[in-house]
Image (cartoon, grey):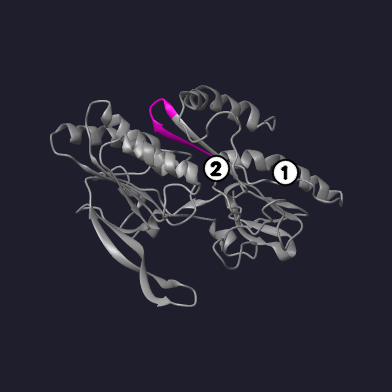
Amino acid sequence: DEVASFDADNNKVTTRAGEEVPYDFMVVATGMEYHYEWIKGLTEDDIGKNGISSVYLSDLEKGTADGGSITWEWFEALKEAAASGKKPTAIYTQPSTAIKCGGAPQKILFLSADHLRKDDLGADFIFTTSKSKLFKHPEFDEALHKVQDGYDTITNKFRHNLVAIDVNNKVATFEETYEIKGEYDEDLEEYDMSEETRMVDMSYDFIHIVPPMGASQALVDSTLGWQKGSAKGWLEVDQYTLQHRRYDNVFGIGDVCGIPLCRTGGSARHQGPIVVGNLVAALEGKPLKGKFDGYTVCPIKTEYGQILMAEFNYEGVAPTIPFLNPAEPRFFWWAFDLYQLKPMYWYLMLKGWF
């Protein structure tokens, strides 16, 4: 079963089966949902057909996650097309919404490009993002541009958000946001700048789509979410204590939290002890001493055998191993991800030991 509605004013939730469950304290960990349907012309059934892939494709009801295998088949189809003599066009998208694992769109770009490079093949790779840069922090942004330079023809289309797709004719439509220079303000000694949008069509042979994402509808419809601002709809918690800002008996953890960070498993791991400690303190009527520092980690696979481990928090870059340059891709992190992360997840993280 799952929560269908929240009634925070009366301290109860209602499940999809219709059961009302009262609570004294509540931890909200509803994560985020994928919305392929927010892209006009696209359905989940289109993934895996007509050159379309999405590593995120999954079905929580069935307990399946087919995105990985579909994307591998997409890699192989892209290589086959590149080997045929005609240079294919491959588009990779990153939506305007918050997403799980902010580095994933670029991981797919680099891994597919490296898959072709190993056989001396190439494609016209186009990376589209609603952002104005590859990464928020300059150190990682510069490093990722250098990685791109090692591949065949990667073109960045910044401030481009996928809004529609013609799956049969292989045309993707993006909303591009751009700036218009106005009149010069002599007092401010600068030009007035305004933003406008226009629709841009791009033809493709292959496209990897990262779906728009959002909080669960139950949360969006409740009083628990932010009511306005960039975090509207996400759980309104204090970014340090992870306690709700209006309901003292509610805490949040993970992707659902409307706080300034990327949504990653590494963040949730660091949040866990904070939430537990502060929840116990709240139960005992004591001050909340636990403070989440905003730790986030995005392990970006830049090629097979190399990972750029982008670690940062509210203050800036925050590497776990300070003497290693965090902006340099390394085999060390690849080996860690391949051999250590899975046992750490199952036997340490989920048991609360790490």
Q: Can you give x and y, in whole percent of width and height, for residue 339 in the image?
A: 51, 22
- In which quadrant of the rendered view does residue 319 lie? top right
- Kindly report the secondary structure that dominates the magenta region of the rendered protein: strand
Q: At 36% across and 71% down in the image, what residue appears?
A: 181
Q: Can you give x and y, in whole percent of width and height, for residue 266 in the image?
A: 58, 38
Let me know if residue 61 appears in the view.
no
Q: Which residue is mark 1?
A: 274
Q: Which residue is mark 2?
A: 264
Please rate how many residues cluster around mark 2, counting C-alpha atoms within 10 Å: few if below 14, some from 14 to 19, many from 20.
Answer: many
Spatial CA distance of label 2 from label 1 is 16 Å
**Location of the C terminus (image quadrant):** top right
Q: Can you give x and y, in whole percent of width and height, for residue 69 in the image?
A: 36, 34
Please indicate whether residue 89 sits to the left or right of residue 137 in the image: left
Q: At 63% across and 26% down in the image, what residue appears?
A: 347
Q: Is residue 71 magenta?
A: no
| Mark sitting on residue 243 | none
Q: At 69% across and 56% down in the image, what residue appears?
A: 238
Please indicate whether residue 320 sits to the left or right of residue 326 in the image: right
- For badge 1, the amino acid type reads Ile
Q: Is residue 302 magenta?
A: yes
Element at badge 1? helix
| Range shown magenta | 297-306
Q: Which residue occupies the foreground of this view, 330 or 285?
A: 330
Please indicate whether residue 1 sits to the left or right of residue 115 in the image: right
The disc, 2 or 1, on the residue closer to the chain's N-terminal end is 2
- In which quadrant of the rendered view does residue 233 lie? bottom right
Determine the residue located farthest toward the left in the rendered image: 85
- For badge 2, the amino acid type reads Thr
Seen in the picture, residue 44 relative to 189 is either above or below; the reply is above
Determine the residue located farthest toward the right in the rendered image: 285
Seen in the picture, residue 334 relative to 300 is either above or below; the reply is above
